[in-house]
Image: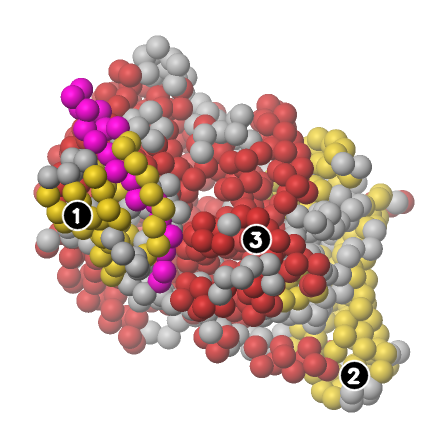
Amino acid sequence: MSVLTRDEAQTRAQLLDVHHYRVDLDLTTGDETFGSTSTIRFTARAAGDTFVELKPVTLHSAVLDGQPLDPAALDGNRLPLSLAEGEHEITLTTTMRYSHTGEGMHRFLDPTDGASYTYTQLFMEDVQRVFAAFDQPDLKAVFELAVTAPEGWTVLTNSVTERGADGRWTSAPTQPLSTYFVCVAAGPWHSIRTEHAGLPFGIHCRRSLAPHLDADADEIIAVTKACFDRFHEKFDEPYPFDSYDQAFVPEFNAGAMENPGLVTFRDEFVFRSAVTATERMTRAMVIAHEMAHMWFGDLVTLRWWDDIWLNESFAEYMGYQTVNEACSDLFADTWIDFGVSRKAWGYDADQRPSTHPVAPDPQAVPDTASALLNFDGISYAKGASALRQLVAWLGEEDFLAGINIHFKRHKFGNATLADFIDNLAAATDRDVHAWAERWLRTTGVDTLTPRLTGEANRWELSVDHDGSRPHRVRASLYDRRPDGELALRDSVLTDVPQREPIRLTGPRPALVVLNDGDLTYAKLRFDEVSEETALRGLSRIPDPLTRAVVWNSARDMVRDGELAPADYLELALAHLTEETELGIVQGVLAFARQQVADRYVPADQRPAALATLREIARALLRRTEDGEDPGLRLTAVRTLVDSATTPDQIASWLDEGTVHGGPELDPELRWRILARLAVLGATDEAAIAAELARDPSATGQEGAARCRASLPDPDAKATAWAAMFDSDDLSNYLFTATALGFWQPEQADLVQEYVERFYPAATALGDRRGPAMAEAAGRYAFPAYAVDADALARGERHLADDAMIPALRRKLVDQLDDLARALRVREA
């Protein structure tokens, strides 16, 4: 299949104006394929040759202006067209194949009740798997959809949909949309409908999840309405579509997708088991993120994929900021979680060889395959951080004024980075173009370090700046009180590079925190006195967002070999046990467990690292015996399970169905415990089968797959490997579950032979099953446990010698760089 190049897209956009699609889908033809007919009305500005894209099982017919075309002319995914100047209409009738990889038209059979569901994910170039199209973002058109569905199904689309006779559903015409935004979700949905601001709103999920959606419906709808109203306070342009549906769909690859009028979410956001307040806040943020896209991405769409950050950075920033403003009665400060968890995603990505500017040069994104690689921590987290810094520098009033100019000038059209910056510049006297050049066109992470000079009661604070970007930061000074608490003395906004030092009077502060409030994107270091104060008194810092900034600095110091991994664990032991902010506890424990214990400490020190994590968890359990903080208690129990090195305690919890003092074991905790028992060799196939009989849901199927792959048995490993790489039967989620169980540090000798086999197997899988499965293989099936020089050399040799699809190559570049970093940390 040919990928679309930027040059080809520009040429076609100069030739064509696309007006209208009529898409007719028949979902009653069986479990493997469906019927698809698309009729496209368009204008050729001049005579010329072009093509329409499709990826059918069979192209039955193609008719251009009443004249049949030869279906055999289909070359890969392109049907060539020779056009005269003027109006045209083409109709293409095809049979298409359902996918089980989360791409195109995904079909899912719910093991709980046998019901089937389908939904589309048409991002980048997957519309061609569902209907024929001129598939590029700047050829927007009106869409009308007709879907024939089985009896008992409901069909959802981007616009209001009505059911006619014989299971045929039709949608109202949409506003002009890019092809990748078209969405159909069909099945026996459980739906909750309401109305807000004169528009129909709905939330939908599988029937088997109905009780869980019902339990959370009030919160989901309240968040949706609050964010909707807040966006209308921020934006001059009203919500541009005729309805707002949110469908929680199975086996979804992303967190969510911003289809206009019909947002699709992974249905793990319909919580079957207990979750923490931080996890509920994450769901709210994703709701707000996708709603922000209705304006930035859907109303105004990028012209080509080099500007994907325009969509994602904006939605990421607005998601966190809007939940903070509109849902403060439900959730803590969202920027704490962003700072300690999400932002680390951007820092990590920006220090790998695969880094790229937030806004890459157009020539660096020559085709759709390369564009797909930029959906990463830079386009999301770093981009959102850059926008937060822009707001700190520009002021929110001017920032929103520029955004509203952008919407007004380009609504229902397409725009570029240059357009966006011009529109911001129209709202301010500041040099936004220079700011954008230094922030959006550069790579890497700056480092800021305070330097105090002087004596007695006269000091000067200057900032050592390792990097090239300008920063507006808040420098805060803390004094140590006699009781050991740290008290804020003063907080000053300063620009870096500084024109002159900040002059201070009084005794030397015990702690100087640059970037207090986390307004910029930079690594933070401390002067010698401040570092000792920060590491000794971290839990004594009064503001949780400041503590998140300091924890992030400690994380960076571990990754850079400046703080020993064991010292980080001791830091966690000293301060997490007193931490009151759940997002910080979860973020720090996740890094400590997944990176420090599993990768950064040498193998012979891993048992001690896990013991420290258990000690932290037990202290948190003791803190929560009164039941007043169930989220913190749940986090502690999860950590105890994941860090267990002997089975007795967690096996007794499973047998009794509860942790003494709570919580009761729900399905998530039961599968978590069973997976750890499998790693430790303390369970067997019979127990896994019994648990699956108890929970036969899709999540149960994934839990069983993970447990079976985790068993320390050669036959179990061989079976899991064959399922992943020797057949294509596993869906995307079952593949991931199996991969997550396969590699375990405790089973290094058992799986050693598979390390060499991984690279050719993953390469072949990517070639057969495409980028989504290739990315899953590179992310989840990579032998991350093998932190040694031989594993690194082996991977680098394959990377140099093997031809592989770009999605897999990018993932392996990142994995091998992380492996090299882990080796450097161990050596340091």
The numbered mark at residue 45 is 2
Q: How is the image coloured?
A: secondary structure
The structure residue drawn at horizontal position 41% and vertical position 17%, both measured from the top left corner, is: 664
Q: Amino acid at mark 1?
A: Leu
Considering the image in quadrants, where does the N terminus appear? Answer: bottom right
Determine whether label 2 and label 1 are within 8 Å by CB. no
Q: CA distance from mark 2 to mark 3?
A: 40 Å
Q: Is residue 74 left or right of residue 734?
A: right
How much space separates mark 2 and mark 1, taking CA atoms?
66 Å
> Is 698 placed left or right of 26 in the picture?
left
Q: Where residue 341 sits in the image (x, y, percent)?
A: 37, 42
- Label 3 sits on residue: 398
Density class for disc 2 (Cα within 10 Å; few <14, some 14-19, many ≥20) is some
Residue shown at the point (23%, 21%) measured from the top left: 619
**Dominant secondary-structure state across the stretch colored magenta:** strand
Q: Is residue 482 magenta?
A: yes
Residues drawn in magenta: 469-487
The residue indicated by pointer 1 is: 452
